[in-house]
C-alpha cells in the first residue's frame, strides 16, 4: 500500500499559482472599478449642457411701406403790413363806392333782325310757265312716265303738288299735298323739279316769292 502525500506539501507547491490568480483577480477588479467610475461620471454629465445658449432667431414682421409724402402746402399770400406812420398816396387808392349819383350804363345789345321775304299765295300777277299753261301741259304730257308699279296695280288719280317760284323764277321746296302711291308721287316731284324757269309773280310791280299748287293727273289708256 502506497503512502499518501502530505496535503500541506501539495498546497505549498501550488502557492505561486494561487498568488498569480489572486493578483490577476485583484488587477481585474481594480480595472473594473476604474472603468465603472468613469462611466458613472460620463453618464452623470450627459444631462448637462455647458455650451452657449443659442438665442432664438426673431423674424421681424414684414416691413410696411412708408406712407406717401404729404402734398406740398399751398402757396400762402404774404400780406405786407404797413405801419400807421407810412402815408399812402391817393393815386394808389381807387374809389369803388357807388353813390346815388353814379349812373351805370349797361352795354347795349344790338340784335340783328333778319327779315324773311314774304311768300305770297295770291298776287296781282301770278307766276307762269314759259309759254303759258298750254306749254306746261305739253311739257307734262311728254315728261311724265307712268310708273310700271302703278300700271300693274291699276292705280290712277291726281297727285297734288305744292312748290315755290322765287323772284328769279326757280322752282323750290316741292312737296306732295295729296298723293296716290304706286310711284306716281315720286314721278310727279321729279317732273316738276326738272321744269325750266318760270316767269316770276309780281306784287305792286316787284318780283316776289309765290307759293303755287299744281295737279298732275295719271290715267291709264
Image (cartoon, helix red, strand yellow):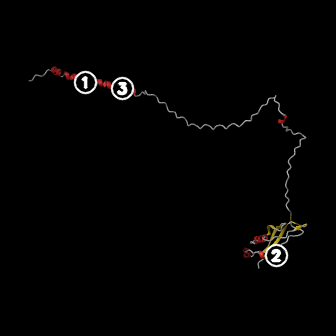
**Is the N terminus in the top left, top right, bottom left or bottom right quadrant?**
top left
- Label whose residue precedes the other's in the sequence (2 or 1): 1
Contact check, label 3 and label 1, Cβ < 8 Å = no
Spatial CA span between label 3 and label 1: 24 Å
Q: Element at badge 3?
A: helix
Contact check, label 2 and label 1, Cβ < 8 Å = no
| Residue 70 image offset from top left, x and y in percent | 66, 37
Mark 2 crowd level (few <14, some 14–19, many ≥20, 10 Å Cα): few
Residue at 23% in and 24% down: 21
Residue at the limit of the structure toward the bottom, as seen here:
221
Mark 1 crowd level (few <14, some 14–19, many ≥20, 10 Å Cα): few
Q: Report which residue position mark 3 lands on.
A: 40
Q: Quadrant of residue 67?
A: top right
Q: Element at badge 1?
A: helix
Q: Element at badge 2?
A: helix
**Is the C terminus in the top left, top right, bottom left or bottom right quadrant?**
bottom right
Q: Is residue 122 visible?
A: no
Q: Of the numbered discs in the image, which one, if any, rests on residue 43?
A: none
Q: Report which residue position mark 1 lands on.
A: 24
Q: Report which residue position mark 2 lands on.
A: 137
Spatial CA span between label 2 and label 1: 166 Å
| Residue 46 image offset from top left, x and y in percent | 40, 28
Left or right: residue 111 versus residue 3 is right
Nearer the observer, 26 or 104? 104
| Residue 198 image offset from top left, x and y in percent | 83, 70
Left or right: residue 51 versus residue 151 is left
Q: Quadrant of residue 68?
A: top right
Nearer the observer, 141 or 55? 141
Residue at 82% in and 76% down: 135
Amino acid at each position: 500500500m502506497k503512502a499518501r502525500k502530505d496535503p500541506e506539501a501539495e498546497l505549498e507547491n501550488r502557492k505561486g499559482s494561487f498568488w498569480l490568480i489572486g493578483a490577476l483577480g485583484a488587477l481585474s477588479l481594480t480595472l473594473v472599478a476604474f472603468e465603472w467610475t468613469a462611466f458613472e461620471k460620463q453618464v452623470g454629465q450627459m444631462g448637462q449642457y455647458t455650451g452657449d445658449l443659442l438665442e432664438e432667431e426673431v423674424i421681424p414682421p414684414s416691413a410696411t411701406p412708408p406712407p406717401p409724402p404729404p402734398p406740398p402746402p399751398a402757396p400762402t399770400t404774404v400780406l405786407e403790413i404797413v405801419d400807421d406812420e407810412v402815408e399812402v398816396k391817393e393815386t394808389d387808392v381807387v374809389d369803388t363806392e357807388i353813390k346815388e349819383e353814379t349812373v351805370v350804363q349797361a352795354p347795349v345789345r344790338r340784335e340783328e333782325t333778319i327779315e324773311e321775304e314774304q311768300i305770297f299765295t295770291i298776287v296781282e300777277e301770278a307766276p307762269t310757265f314759259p309759254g303759258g299753261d298750254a306749254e306746261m301741259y305739253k311739257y307734262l304730257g311728254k315728261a311724265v312716265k307712268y310708273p310700271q308699279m302703278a300700271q300693274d296695280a291699276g292705280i290712277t288719280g291726281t297727285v297734288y303738288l305744292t312748290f315755290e317760284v322765287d323772284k328769279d323764277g326757280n322752282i323750290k321746296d316741292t312737296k306732295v299735298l295729296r298723293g296716290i302711291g304706286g310711284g306716281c308721287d315720286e314721278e310727279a316731284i321729279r317732273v316738276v323739279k326738272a321744269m325750266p324757269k318760270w316767269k316770276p309773280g309780281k306784287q305792286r310791280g316787284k318780283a316776289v316769292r309765290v307759293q303755287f299748287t299744281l295737279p298732275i293727273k295719271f290715267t291709264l289708256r
